[in-house]
Image (cartoon, rainbow, N blue to C red):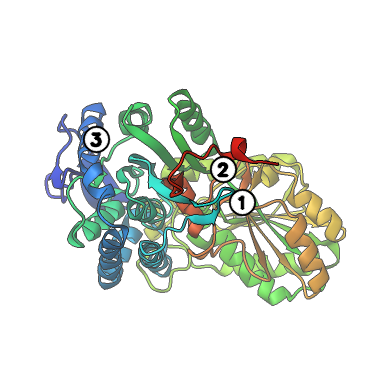
């Protein structure tokens, strides 16, 4: 630990260690001998300092004109563009996904920064006719105050950007707690914002575990909103805690996403999409394609092709250009994946590819698992209904579109879905009837863009959406304003003569 870089919290414009002096290690999941750095193991005292800093900075920031706030965010986007390759390599080291994916992660943060900066000259409300003469009626957006962000490890820069950029352009201040598996990417993101000229205290970074940092943030009386991305169970606890103290709460949680494959589909295209959706980011995406619901007429041919493709994938250290899939984030996550393979076998699914830990040579240094395909999966099996968060794909044969839609909707999640067909009528039926927040036609279940809402239904979230203009509804309150220039007291509905 003595020779590794030591990173600190960022509070009130300064890098500071945890009050306790305790630290934790961050190691490369593809190579445990690669110590990326040590980071502060923070606790309630550090949260108190960070929230107090954000509270002090709030009035100055909310009164800064929104276009001026936006200019800082735009500069941050430019800085991220300049540092994209460096930050992508840091992310691959600490998170494991391949370089082309971490470059995309940083690019999404860049896109979000530029998009949010554009809202600084808009932040639209409404002007509407008043029902009385000589009276003007409008609504405006008002910031909330101090916002807490709790973010996951699988998109360690993109997801913080979805929360921080819109929160700041709306005039809020923030405290972020990143996942302990990927703190460096958030350090890099905060550094870009500070270098862009963000005033001290507007954004604060506190690193550490859920009990040490997350719970104190949830309970702090000066925190007005908690924005969380992670597991459904933790999200439920956050929702309960926010309800007890009347905080706003935005939750983005699990998924069990299905790709429907009809008998008229382009099978080659579907195989590529399923491979990318199931094994990109080692299946560690909330939008990962974990189910392919396929018409029985083409199930055999599709299964043969996807098995061949899965077996050919090169798995290894994501810093190597030829590698197509990286490791699981941790040994614990890899053990979870392995346990679900055992569940699938006991349930009677046919293991068509993979299913084992990858060992030998460089694989012994990290948490690698084979790309895994189960065939002949029944809709009610646990591997077909529970989120695995690993490189496991379940193939579910069905008879036609109606059954496919019923199976797609049979799980407790509703984040993303897709259909492959050449029949436009069937595509539109699926668009209408599959119960998800994001839907694709002839594309994978992953690949959202920042200008459209991101989020899902059922146990995937609590009704809010990130990205697009809808994210502004998370980070602002509506204020209705009436200006009466009649020179007398008008009593609204009471003054009507009819």
Q: Which of 33/400 is in front?
A: 400
Q: Label 2: few (<14), some or many (≥20) within 10 Å? A: many
- Mark linked to residue 41: 3
Residue 389 horizontal side relative to residue 216, left or right: right
Q: Nearer the viewer, mark 1 or mark 3?
A: 1
* Element class at badge 3: loop
Select label 2 or label 3 by which is in front: 2
Place of residue 76 in the rendered image (x, y in percent of width and height, measured from the top left): 27, 64
Quadrant containing the C terminus is top right
Quick check: can you spot residue 300?
no
- Distance in Å between CA atoms under marks 2 and 3: 29 Å
Label 2–label 1 contact, CB within 8 A: yes
Above or below 212: residue 471: below
Q: Where residue 218 appears, x then y in whole percent?
A: 38, 30
Residue linked to disc 1: 415
Total marks shown come to 3
Q: CA distance from mark 1 to mark 3?
A: 33 Å
Q: Residue at x 44, y 60 (%)?
A: 326
Q: Closer to the camera, 490 or 272?
A: 490
User: Residue 345's quadrant in the figure?
Assistant: top right
Disc 2 designates what residue?
461
Q: Earlier in the sequence, mark 1 or mark 3?
A: 3
Earlier residue among tags 2 and 1: 1
């Amino acid at each position: 630990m003595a020779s590794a870089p030591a990173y600190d919290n960022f509070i009130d414009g300064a890098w500071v260690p945890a009050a306790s002096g305790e630290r934790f290690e961050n190691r490369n999941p593809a190579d445990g001998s690669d110590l990326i750095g040590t980071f502060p193991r923070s606790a309630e005292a550090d949260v108190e300092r960070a929230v107090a800093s954000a509270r002090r900075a709030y009035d100055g920031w909310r009164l800064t004109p929104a276009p001026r706030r936006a200019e800082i965010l735009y500069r941050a986007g430019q800085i991220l563009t300049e540092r994209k390759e460096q930050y992508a390599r840091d992310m691959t080291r600490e998170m494991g996904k391949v370089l082309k994916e971490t470059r995309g992660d940083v690019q999404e943060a860049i896109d979000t920064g530029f998009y949010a900066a554009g809202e600084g000259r808009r932040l639209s409300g409404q002007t509407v006719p008043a029902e009385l003469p000589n009276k003007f009626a409008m609504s405006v957006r008002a910031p909330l105050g101090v916002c807490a962000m709790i973010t996951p490890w699988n998109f360690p820069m993109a997801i913080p950007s979805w929360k921080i950029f819109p929160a700041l352009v709306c005039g809020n201040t923030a405290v972020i707690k990143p996942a302990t598996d990927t703190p460096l990417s958030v350090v890099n993101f905060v550094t870009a914002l500070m270098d862009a000229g963000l005033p001290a205290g507007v954004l604060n970074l506190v690193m550490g575990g859920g009990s040490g940092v997350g719970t104190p943030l949830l309970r702090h009386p000066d925190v007005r909103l908690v924005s969380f991305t992670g597991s459904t169970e933790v999200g439920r606890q956050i929702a309960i805690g926010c309800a007890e103290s009347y905080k706003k709460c935005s939750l983005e949680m699990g998924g069990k996403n299905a790709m429907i494959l009809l008998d008229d589909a382009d099978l080659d295209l579907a195989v590529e999409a399923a491979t990318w959706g199931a094994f990109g980011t080692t299946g560690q995406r909330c939008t990962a394609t974990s189910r392919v619901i396929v018409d029985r007429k083409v199930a055999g041919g599709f299964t043969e092709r996807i098995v061949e493709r899965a077996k050919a994938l090169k798995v290894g250290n994501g810093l190597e250009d030829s590698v197509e899939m990286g490791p699981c984030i941790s040994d614990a996550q890899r053990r979870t994946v392995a346990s679900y393979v055992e569940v699938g076998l006991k349930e009677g699914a046919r293991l068509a590819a993979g299913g084992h830990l990858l060992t030998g040579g460089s694989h012994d240094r990290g948490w690698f698992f084979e790309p895994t395909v189960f065939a002949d999966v029944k809709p009610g099996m646990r591997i077909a209904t529970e989120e695995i968060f690993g490189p496991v794909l379940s193939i579910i044969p069905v008879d036609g579109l109606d059954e496919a839609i019923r199976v797609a909707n049979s799980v407790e999640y509703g984040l993303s879905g897709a259909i492959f067909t050449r029949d436009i009528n069937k595509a539109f039926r699926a668009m209408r009837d599959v119960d998800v927040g994001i839907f694709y036609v002839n594309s994978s279940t992953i690949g959202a863009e920042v200008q459209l809402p991101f989020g899902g239904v059922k146990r995937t979230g609590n009704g809010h959406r990130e990205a697009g203009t809808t994210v502004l509804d998370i980070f602002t309150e509506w204020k209705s304003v009436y200006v009466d220039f009649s020179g007398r007291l008008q009593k609204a509905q009471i003054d009507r003569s009819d």
